[in-house]
Image (cartoon, rainbow, N blue to C red):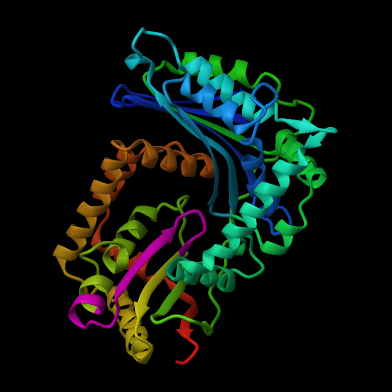
Amino acid sequence: MAELTRSELFPGVHLTAVHTEKFKSCVLGASFLAPLDRTTAACNALVPSVLRRGTQEHPDMESLSAALDELYGGSIEPVVRTRGETQCVGFLGSFLDDAYTLDGSAILEKAAALLGELLLRPCTEQGVFRRDYTDSERQNLIDRIQAQVNDKRSYALLRLKREMCAGEPFGVDRLGDESSARAITPESLWARYQDLLRTAPMELYYCGSAKPERVADALRAALSQLPTDGVRIPLPRPAAKEAPAQPREVVESLDVTQGKLTMGLRTGSTVWSEDYPALLLANAIFGGTTTSRLFLHVREKLSLCYYASSQLEKLKGVMLVSSGVEFDKVGEARSEILSQLEACRKGAFEDWELEGARRSVVSALHSAMDAQARLEDFWLGQAVAGLTEDPEALARRVEEVTREQVVAAFSSLQLDTIYFLKGREA
């Protein structure tokens, strides 16, 4: 049975420790939390990659790899994610759990020390980041931004969010934009890094067999040099926004052989809402599972889409619908997707659909307890939201949701934006 402990190690620096003996490896992570902002997103995204190039004690990737090899082949990798309108940048590591070392030696303290070294003692020149490291990782970031268009399914969703939430932080990409990335210098990146160290709330995470008190002590020691002369600014909740009276429509042409039809809906509810469990079920019924309306009716029965699904952005109050269609079937597919949504609004779904969705959502929440990556991802979202409800508690709330509550959740959905990616010849 996993035991969760949440504590504040320094002002604005919190640790979520999951004590469990279920896994043979332990997960250790640290993330700076910053508001999504076009002017800082690229810089924030670049910081962990440059930090990972070398430290004062291990000035290059070869020596860092050797240090990780000594920890039974552990890993610490840079991560850049968003949760709602918050950008989360830092490191996520995986190490052999102390309970499985050959000689009974402790790994946790050494792993925490290496994490602290990466975060606080970077390899520098002339008081800022090394220029060669900055230039190399900046180009890698630019390449990643440019490569987003290669995955047309993900690209269509990215473009939908940009159009739907233009002027809102949620519309900013986690990697920032290309022009901002090109403008980064070692000096500007160092200044941004100092801002993160002093003002960004920090989330630490551990999952493994060590007692929470020991984990807290190890991380306090590893982060003892963390600056204390700044004020870590609490993150605001995303602002609720109504859909326009007339949905916006955007069409873009690229060299594609399959159309990408995406739709963005405002849900009227977020993870903080009492009716959030009902919204989870509504999404599962509509397009979140292989027994959903979009999958069974639009894709399987009518063959209007190669794929059709929906997903929730729980910290923003947005549902995103994604589908792949033939160019000449986009009108039919769009009409049928909206028709299925209207049917759900009226409660025209069978009891087996509701119960199938319930079993799918509950099973996914329970199975998160058995996968370290999913568990870490869940708790990062909860930490950003300021919530402590675990997956099993949320599953119990889902079990209690009534049909009437699901219909009410459907009724709150408002179509905001339709984005269609078509071929140039279409």
Q: Residue furthest left?
A: 352
Q: Is residue 412 left or right of residue 236?
A: left
Q: Residue furthest front?
A: 62
Q: Residue furthest right?
A: 126
Q: Nearer the viewer, residue 1 or 376?
A: 376
Residue at 67 percent across and 21 percent down: it is 57
Q: Quadrant of the C terminus?
A: bottom left
Is residue 313 magenta-colored? yes
Question: x, y (%) of residue 35?
Answer: 65, 50
Task: Tell me which corner region of the image, top left, top right, bottom left or bottom right, holds residue 169.
Answer: bottom right
Residue at 27 percent across and 78 percent down: it is 343
Q: Is residue 233 visible?
A: yes
Tally of numbered discs:
0
When the figure is inspected, residue 77 is found, relative to residue 216, above or below; the finding is below
Q: Nearer the viewer, residue 249 or 251?
A: 251
Is residue 151 magenta-colored? no
Q: Which residues are magenta?
A: 298-318
Q: Is residue 405 visible?
A: no
Residue at 25 percent across and 58 percent down: it is 402
Residue at 35 percent across and 69 percent down: it is 410
Q: Is residue 382 left or right of residue 395?
A: right
Question: x, y (%) of residue 394?
Answer: 33, 44
When the figure is inspected, residue 114 is found, relative to residue 396, above or below; the finding is above
Q: Nearer the viewer, residue 291 or 102?
A: 102
Q: Is residue 378 left or right of residue 336?
A: right
Question: x, y (%) of residue 347?
Answer: 25, 72
Q: Quadrant of the N terminus?
A: top left
Question: x, y (%) of residue 166?
Answer: 63, 70
